[in-house]
């Protein structure tokens, strides 16, 4: 992880009360390119370097009831180049369901143009029980 990514992760960790299960990733809008930290790979159940992050891979891990809403949130972030925040569920490689909070801030190029999103993820400490309870839709707007 880059020094900037580590700084973003430390800031998010403070904002989320020091949650130990946190990771970060970056998403470039133009070419839909993802880059994730080893911690995010682990959240999804992969060893560092085992999987190449992509929109399709991340969508496959979304809980079926959350896929459309998260896809809409991502599409809106791309269209408006605005920050976002969601709470949703993912299903890891062991088929365990986890609640996650994803905070996406703007990622800027050298000229100051928004080119993507710098994202921080926090995972619930235990797998959630899928009892039909749906997480809140969008947890914050900036």
Image (cartoon, rainbow, N blue to C red):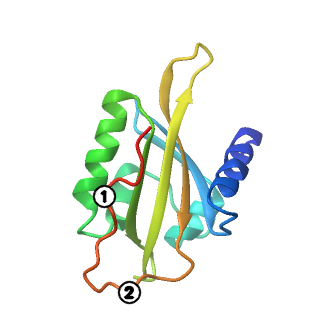
Q: Earlier in the sequence, mark 1 or mark 2?
A: 2
Which residue in the rendered view is the most extreme toward the top?
A: 111
Task: Give the answer, above or below, for where 90 lies relative to 15.
Answer: below
With 70 as the anchor, is 90 left or right in this view? right
Question: Closest to the observer: 26 or 21?
Answer: 21
Q: Is disc 1 placed on a helix, strand or loop?
A: loop
Q: Please identify the quadrant where the C terminus is shown.
A: top left
Task: Give the answer, above or below, for where 47 lies relative to 72.
Answer: below
Which residue in the rendered view is the most extreme toward the right?
A: 3
Q: Residues within 10 Å of mark 1 (few under 14, many from 20)?
A: some
Q: Residue at x 49, y 44 (%)?
A: 104
Task: Give the answer, above or below, for where 108 lies relative to 124.
Answer: above
Q: Is residue 80 visible?
A: yes
**x, y percent for residue 23:** 61, 58
**x, y percent for residue 30:** 40, 28
Spatial CA span between label 1 and label 2: 18 Å
Q: Residue at x 64, y 53 (%)?
A: 15
Task: Give the answer, above or below, for where 31 lies relative to 19.
Answer: above
**x, y percent for residue 106:** 51, 33
Q: Which residue is label 2 attached to?
A: 129
Q: Which residue is label 1 attached to?
A: 137
Question: Closest to the observer: 84 or 51?
Answer: 84
Question: Closest to the observer: 14 or 69?
Answer: 14
Q: Is disc 2 placed on a helix, strand or loop?
A: loop
**x, y percent for residue 133:** 29, 78
Tell me whether circle 1 and circle 2 mark residues in contact (CB < 8 Å): no
With 20 as the anchor, is 79 left or right in this view? left
Q: Residue at x 73, y 48 (%)?
A: 6
Quarter of image, res 141: top left
Q: Residues within 10 Å of mark 2 (few under 14, many from 20)?
A: few
Question: Which is more foreground, mark 1 or mark 2?
Answer: 1
């Amino acid at each position: 992880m880059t020094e900037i990514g580590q700084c973003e992760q430390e800031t998010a960790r403070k904002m989320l009360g020091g949650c130990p299960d946190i990771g970060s990733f970056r998403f470039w809008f133009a070419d839909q390119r993802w880059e994730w930290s080893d911690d995010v790979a682990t959240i999804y159940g992969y060893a560092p370097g085992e999987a190449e992050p992509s929109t399709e891979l991340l969508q496959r891990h979304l809980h079926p009831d959350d896929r459309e809403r998260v896809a809409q949130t991502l599409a809106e972030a791309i269209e408006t180049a605005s920050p976002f925040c969601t709470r949703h569920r993912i299903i890891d490689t062991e088929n365990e369901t986890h609640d996650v909070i994803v905070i996406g801030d703007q990622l800027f190029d050298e000229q100051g143009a928004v080119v993507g999103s710098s994202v921080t993820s926090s995972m619930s400490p235990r797998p959630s029980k899928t009892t039909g309870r749906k997480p809140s839709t969008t947890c914050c707007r900036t």
